[in-house]
Every structure is written in structure tokens, then in C-alpha cells.
Amino acid sequence: MIQVDIEKKIKAYKGTRNLKVPHFFSSGSVTLITGESGVGKTTFLKILAGFIEPDRGRINVNGVEWVNTQTKKNISPQKRLVGFVFQDYALFPNMTVLQHLQYATKDELWIEKLLTISKLETFINHLPVYLSGGQQQRLAIIRALATKPEILLMDEPFSALDIEIKQHIINELATIFGLLSTTVLIVSHNPYELENIATNRLIIEI
């Protein structure tokens, strides 16, 4: 489970906004996060991952305190072991598709399964620059899954995928999430495409 009660001032088009999220995420749940553009959805994911520190608040995960601004406790991103799918993919330019996965795991059977799910089997020796935007996005998704994370944060993970591939990936992810009992938070501008896998919804408002 993830217990969050944080605040963070964020820059907005007109001045600043106050991102405030008090929420409880149950273990194994899939939560769809929505809200207006610029409201702080991506910032919230990055706070959970440890890339950004909140101005005030606490984060507790499975009984372990990750963040407490009063005591100045802030566990490093490396120790949080969170899977993260970035909007800009954040792929390594000098690593092939296969090397991205091998860097994350030594489980060859799991790598094969992820390649099959993403339909990237024939692109294992390609560098990101030779992949389409949709292929790069699929690689970013399976790289995040390679470590079998207990928590997976996904920021607009399907925006570059065509309808057929998107539905295939979403269906496969639903199975994987159940298999791994992963707690998943997904930011999406299109909530309807995730109705079949999302068990909860969080609307971030100012």
C-alpha cells in the first residue's frame, strides 16, 4: 500500500499552483490519474519516484517511511525500486533494445516474454534512434517492467501507439499486473482507453 499526503508548489502558466495530494493506494491496485493540463500529475509521479522532493508531507509504502519533510527523511530513488515510464521515454541512446532489458534483468525467459508482448522481437539489435516513436514507447514500457517492480508509475504511456498495438499492450499489461501484484499509477489524457484495467481513479485538482 502507498499512503501519500504531500504538497508542492509548482510553476504554472499563470504564476504558481499548489499541488496537494492526500491519497491511499491499495496494494495491487491500478489507479488512473487525471486532471487539467499543468495541474501537477507528472510532478506527483516524480515525487513518488524520488526525483522531486515535496515541500511538505509524508509518503509511506508498505509500512516503510519513504518521505517525511518534518524529519527530513527522503529515501533515494535507487532504494525505492520503482518502475517508471517517462513521457519522453528516457532511453539510453547507445543501448540496443535487448541491452536495455539485459541491463535491468538477467532473466532471459522474462526478457523473451516482454519482447513478445511488445512485438519488438525483430528489433532487438536496434538502437532507439532507429525505432519509431511507438516502438520507443513500447521499449520504455517493457524496460520498466523488466525488474518486476512492486510499484509502476506510467506517464502517458500509450500516447504514441496506434489503436491496434495500444489495445494489445493494454490487454497484456492487465495480465502482467495481476501476475506480479504490481501497484500501478497511470497518468493519461484519455481515461476511457484504460477502463478495462484501472480499478481506481484519482483526479488531481487545484
Image (tube, rainbow, N blue to C red):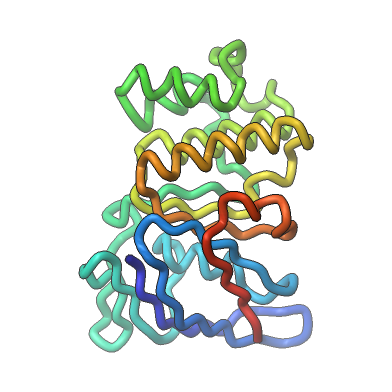
Left or right side of 180 for 91: right
- Residue 90, how many percent across, how many down? 56, 43
Quick check: 42 above or below 126? below
Residue closest to the eye, 171 or 66: 171
- Which of the 4 quarters of the picture holds residue 36? bottom right
| Nearest to the observer: residue 86 or residue 92 | 86
Taking the image as drawn, is residue 96 in sight?
no
Residue 43 visible within the image: yes
Residue shown at 60% from the left, 79% from the top: 10
Between residue 143 and residue 31, name the one nearer to us.
31
Q: Position of residue 112 (x, y in %)?
A: 44, 18
Residue at 70% across / 37% down in the picture? 166
Q: Quadrant of the N terminus?
A: bottom left
Residue at 34% x, 50% y is 150
Q: Is residue 131 left or right of residue 74?
A: right
For this view, does 131 lie left or right of residue 61? right
Q: Tell me if 63 is positioned left or right of 191 in this view.
A: left
Query: Which residue is depicted at the point 60% across and 15% down?
Result: 123
Give the quadrant of the C terminus. bottom right
Q: Is residue 123 above or below residue 88?
A: above
List x then y, in percent, for residue 18.
59, 87
Count of all numbered marks drawn on residues in the image:
0
Q: Position of residue 114 (x, y in %)?
A: 48, 26
